[in-house]
Image (tube, rainbow, N blue to C red):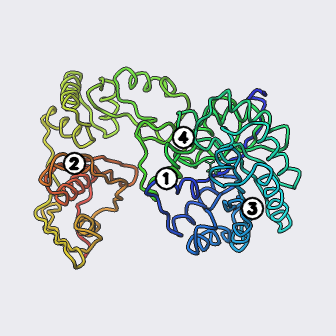
Amino acid sequence: MRALSDVGEVQFLDTTLRDGEQAPGVSLTPDDKADIARSLDAARIDVIEAGSACTGPGERETISRVAGLDLDSTVTSFCRGIQNDIDLALDCGVDGINLVVPASDKHVEQKVGTSKSENVDNTVELVEYAVDHGLWVEVIGEDGSRADLDYLEELLGAAVEAGADRICWADTVGHATPDRALECVSRLSDLGPVSTHTHDDLGLAVTNALVSIAAGADLVHGTINGIGERAGNVALEEVAIALDHGYGVESMALTEVYDLAQLIANRTGIPLAPNKAVVGENAFTHESGIHTDGTLKDDSMYEPYPPEKVGRERRLALGKHAGRAGVEAALDEHDVEVTDDQLSEIVSRVKEIGDRGKRVTDADLLTIADEVTDDARARRVELLGLTAVSGSDTPTASVRLSVDGEERKEAAVGSGPVDAAMNAAEVALSHTADATLEDYHVDAITGGTDALVTVEIEMSRGDDHVVVSASDSDITRASVRAMVDAMDRLVADDEEPLVADD
Ligand SMILES: CC(C)C(=O)C(=O)O
């Protein structure tokens, strides 16, 4: 076993487009796969497993498209131990293949229905065939963590002798303990370059990947956000940060990690848990008074590494644990000055909202500050009316706004009534200010069809950002109210009159 700090660099194979797509409910379009592949390449992922050519003509077209993107990453197709799979991969123009052959008794005898020696012979033939056709070849012993280790060595050793570029230890069902990972990968790394493919069924995927590297593996298979079958594959961003932060070992480009995580959550429809390491919403958010106070004194007080390292920013949130320092800093961000007594009152009102189980948005904070400083703000942008229609025809909406006392009416279409109404409000406001909708989500839907819905949106204008929420039993009304409120906040201090430019 080697010290991880002695390992200079580790390569990554990303299988988001193959094993990740095997997560229940995920189906990526050709455009999704092409966009994700480009981003993986930009993040310096060494190998991209683009899919399984044997899946069907649609998948082959997509793999061919990824293979044709002229990426720096090596593009591969997953292939079963069947020559036709290799032929289909060749038709897609990939650089290489991940050839999967059974390794455990269960997989050799029960699943594939062959004998151990025939399995070795077949693997050798297929490797020779693929190498003869100019492919980069990695041979994966499926269910390797439950295989008889002597047999796994014989099988993968034969693959190396037949010309395979590398072999891979697969903990297919996420069954291995770190000791087992160490034992298997140490033995296999005597045969040739070894990859490791770990799953998270025991919550040990990252640990097993790190142990595998210590045991000699130099390439880690995984997915972004750890998506994949069952409990998922190892999350590459977690391996990357652990290697970098813990041992100074280089792998993928860390600054790209957050955008990649968002892209993949977006396209796969698998949201990120807020507490997810590295890329979860809360990973660099501090709410409690003690932590906020400490963070304001020294950024690194409650963070292992700076958020910028993984393409993120630090956030101070307000809620029931807020303290004076955090509230003061949040008010500062909006250039609101208060006295000590006013600050105490604002802190206690913020905590009251938090005690009711709610998040305190920027708009909440500013409303409280207005009330406490007795400086009720005159609104510049107000919602006067809203009509949204949806049915079998294109959803349409119209909004009526008051902007600095002038009434503006606009109508627009959209993919649904909310989208149409937001588009109409955007058109009505765009005369005024160049604001961008950064984030939109429906926060809480409780109970039945008449339940209260909370819409939270983030908008920006130049360097200013606000987060505003609005609750209503009508999701369209809540959305437009939040947008109009955010806009009103963003232009509050603007000296210029908000005239329409026709
Ligand atoms: C590499 C393959 C077959 C796999 O996805 C696994 O073993 O989990």
Q: Tell me the mark number nearer the camera, choosing from 2 and 3.
A: 3
**Can you identify the residue that label 2 sits on?**
445
4 or 1: tag closer to the N-terminus? 1
Question: CA–CA distance between discs 4 and 1?
Answer: 30 Å
Question: CA–CA distance between discs 2 and 3?
Answer: 47 Å
Q: Tell me the mark number nearer the camera, choosing from 4 and 1.
A: 1
Q: Position of residue 371 (x, y in %)?
A: 13, 36
Q: Is residue 406 above or below residue 229?
A: below
Is the CB atom of the residue marked by disc 1 within 8 angstroms of ligand 1's nearest atom? no
Q: Residue furthest bottom?
A: 393
Query: Tag on residue 23?
Result: 1
The disc labelled 1 sits on which kind of residue? Ala
Q: Is residue 90 above or below residue 198?
A: below
Question: CA–CA distance between discs 4 and 2?
Answer: 33 Å
- Side of 167 where 263 appears, left or right: left
The disc labelled 4 sits on which kind of residue? Glu
Q: Tell me the mark number nearer the camera, choosing from 4 and 2.
A: 2
2 or 3: tag closer to the N-terminus? 3
4 or 3: tag closer to the N-terminus? 3
4 or 2: tag closer to the N-terminus? 4
Query: Which element is circle 1 on?
Result: loop
1 or 3: tag closer to the N-terminus? 1
* Residue at (14% x, 38% y) in the render: 375
Report which quarter residue 82 is drawn in: bottom right
**Can you identify the residue that label 4 sits on?**
308
**Can you identify the residue that label 3 sits on?**
96
